[in-house]
Image (cartoon, rainbow, N blue to C red):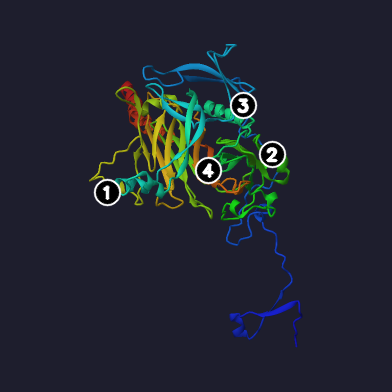
Amino acid sequence: MFEPSAETVTKNEFDEFETIFGGSRIETVNKESNEWPPPALGDAAIKRTDSLESPQTPLFDEDTSQPLEDFPPKYEGPGWEMYLRHPTKKKLTGNRFWKKIFVKLSENSVVQLYNKKEDNDPFQELPLQACYSLSEISAQQYDQYGKIFTVKLQYIFYRERVGVRKGQIAKVMQGQIMSVGQIAKLGMPLEHAPQISQLLKLGTQNYDDLKVFALQVEDALFHMSIHRDRALTYKTEEIQVTVQDELYVEQTKTGYVTKQLARVRLFFLAFINGMPSVEVGINDMTRQGKEVVGRHDIIPVVTEEWIRLEACEFHASVIQEEFENRTIKLHPPDACLFELLRFRIRPPKNRELPLQVSTNLTVTRTKVELRCEVLVPGCISRKHGQIPCEDICIRLHIPECWIYFFRTEKHLRYGSVKSASRRPGKIKGIERFLGATHNIEPTLLEASAGQAKYEHAFHSLVWRIPRLPKEGQGAYTQQLLLLRLPLTSFDQVPDKFYDYVHVEFTMPATTVSHAVVRSISVTNENPPEKFVRYVAKHEYKVEINVNYSLEENEYMAAANVSPATTAAVPSQPTVEKEQKEDESDNSD
């Protein structure tokens, strides 16, 4: 008789073939062999989580054999040709105008303004300070033909003032509150309101130059030293942290990703009493299992994800010696928004991009068709659920010889033709049935979402979509932009087209790096309120698929010319018949 040992267990499994053939199967299972095979994704998947509910997807690329490429690339030029908004401050009786200047950024972080590039002495200098900041790049009307891109160098200071709740306004309007004492009983929430003082306003019609200038100024502000030199008192203590991902992707027309560059930046803003020290904990994989924080310092996190940090750079307020233990400890400056930390990551390969763009350009002798398709696969995470893509901007370059197609004259300036909103139907050929009741005329521009128009500042057709997927839509919903240009014999066709489409958008979560702020510890007795915001900025450079279809036009041209050709050239039998008639006449 078979007796199982202590190390093995016999297990009889039911099999429908056993009922027919009368056999039995005995399976031996080793109880002590708890060794599971290693995950196929390696160390990047091990560091994710122990929860069985989280998908085993890599968080970073394990291949560190190649050095990190500079991102953003270093600038080594002499300066930038820009326009200065003069005078700096608005006046009721004076007019402001754009003054053409040349801007340089010196090694000691001084913005120098020159009248001309060849001048030796600047007419104005502005030393940068750590409390300065730059505004977002915006566009405003420059002249009747186009716009200008602007950025403001500004100083922001904060004031603690009383805020008003929504319910309080309704009670005052209804007459329920008759005195200030009754308002005090409801509670007086305090907010830290920013007060902005503009120092310089610069503009240029080259978008790339302004982006490079903004990056250089931000880099200079990051490396400046600032210290907390006095103790202040706030009625409401507060800490705000912003985690920002930046991703640059180059993609071929077939969808293959050839380059991925990414970095993470942490911005810090504190309103704290006294002279405390602050300790910030992020999901660094070398710190896993070594965290010692208080209960009030923990920031709730849905998943346990651990990432690898590379090329870390710190602000001057961070104590460098403490980071040897992978601890970010600092004495934050008071009421100053500054960049605390920046580090690089390696995005995993073969990961599906959150926004996929495919562009086809078909050129014939009689028309040009540009077809741009956008698909959002649906980036879903346990932390945020369905994450949409917001503020999408897709730029398609247009040759100068075709600009007049998009121009319309207005009262005081020239305008651009805007796209018509067309939703592609699910029934093929439904336009033929609706033609009796609706006159569906083909338009120059058609877009299924957002709005597209030609913007001369970019020299491109710009398609702007506020959000994808839309409210109520699910993933894998395709959006389409269609451009049809009818060409005549007078229109020129360029020998070569620009090969790329530029895409920019943001996502309200750090989906690229999976960076998370896990804890914020303050040495004060009363812990302050903590707010953490996540955002990711994406920039793609996608190749265009250009097709030249001239065979159809050559066939039509040959078909139109063939009747005239046959009439002009006599056939061979007719010539032979005429020769025979001439010979018979001569014989007679």
Helix, strand or loop at disc 2? Answer: loop
Q: What is the three-letter code of the residue carrying label 4?
A: Val
Q: Which residue is mark 4?
A: 535
In this view, the residue farthest toward the bottom is: 1
Q: Position of residue 219 (x, y in %)?
A: 61, 30
Q: Secondary structure at mark 4?
A: strand
Q: Nearer the viewer, mark 4 or mark 1?
A: 4
Is label 2 or label 3 in front? 2
Badge 1, how many Cα within 10 Å: few under 14, some, many 20+? few
The answer to which image quadrant residue 303 occupies is bottom right
Q: Tag on residue 433? A: 1
Nearer to us in this view, 374 or 532: 532
* Furthest residue in direction left, as rendered: 437
Q: Residue at x 46, y 34 (%)?
A: 395
Q: Amino acid at mark 2?
A: Ile
Label 2 vs 3, first from the N-terminus: 3
Q: Position of residue 147 (x, y in %)?
A: 42, 25
**Residue denoted by label 3:** 75
Q: Earlier in the sequence, mark 1 or mark 3?
A: 3
Residue to which mark 2 is pinned: 319
- Is tag 1's residue or tag 2's residue first in the polypeptide sequence? 2
Q: Taking 55 as reference, is 187 above or below it?
A: above
Q: Nearer the viewer, mark 1 or mark 2?
A: 2
